Amino acid sequence: MSLISQLCSDEIFDPFLSMINRCPVLNTPTDWKETPDAHIFVSDLPGLKKEEVTVEVVDEGKVLQISGDRKNEEINEDNKNDKWHRVERCRGKFLRRFRLPGNAKSDEVKASMENGVLVVTVPKQEIKKPEKKVIEIEEIKGSE
């Protein structure tokens, strides 16, 4: 719908809502918290079932990827004559990627989903700090 037709109709144009619907970051909000034992990602995915969401660790275990597809409502005999006045809920594919820190155990990632909330737990491993080693300086003979 063009801007002119939006201004002339009874619909109020909301540029902020339009931006949210087109932005995968804003329409798939995700919290990331770090506990002593794990990194925990919590994504709001209302209306989606776990079969419609994919959780992967990609790029050699360095990136957590959450993706899926919000399907459009199917047109059938029951709703073919329906007239839509507003369509604000996001539809289509989404993809979120998070670079995992070096202490992530990317081979032990677990995910669960309940009531449209996805929880991904990435356990942490202790990163050993390099030990300090003092190097003895040798004296070169004959350079005096």
Image (spheres, helix red, strand yellow):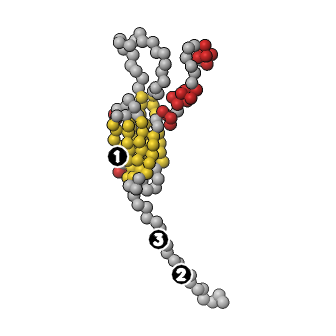
Are dots 3 and 2 in contact, CB under 8 Å?
no
The residue located at (58%, 26%) in the rendering is 15
Q: Is residue 59 above or below residue 93?
A: below
| Three-letter amino acid code at the position of disc 2 | Glu
Is the residue under label 1 in contact with that under label 3 (CB below 8 Å)?
no
Query: What secondary structure is found at the residue carrying circle 3?
Result: loop
Q: Mark on residue 126?
A: none
The crowd level at tag 3 (other Cα within 10 Å; few <14, some 14-19, many 20+) is few
**Can you see residue 52?**
no
Which residue lies at the image location 34% right of the left edge and 32% below the top edge? 49
**Residue 9 screen position, x and y as percent:** 57, 13
Q: Is residue 115 above or below residue 34?
A: above
Secondary element type, mark 1: strand
Of the numbered discs 3 and 1, the one sitting upstream in the chain is 1
- Amino acid, disc 1: Lys
Disc 2 on helix, strand or loop? loop
Look at the picture and state if 124 lies above or below 81.
Answer: below
Q: Quadrant of the N terminus?
A: top right
Residue at image mark 3: 131
From the viewer's side, name the closer residue of 27 and 65: 27
Mark 1 touches mark 2? (CB < 8 Å): no
Distance between the Cα atoms at labels 3 and 2? 16 Å
Of labels 3 and 2, earlier in sequence is 3
Question: In the rendered picture of this protein, how many numbered marks are placed on residues?
Answer: 3
Circle 2 packing at 10 Å, graded few (<14), some (14-19), many (20+), is few
Question: Which residue was labeled with disc 1?
Answer: 110
Residue 121 seen in render: yes
Q: Residue 52 sits in which quadrant?
A: top left
The amino acid pointed to by label 3 is Glu
- Reading the image, the residue beneath label 2 is 136
Ranked by sequence position, the earlier of labels 1 and 2 is 1
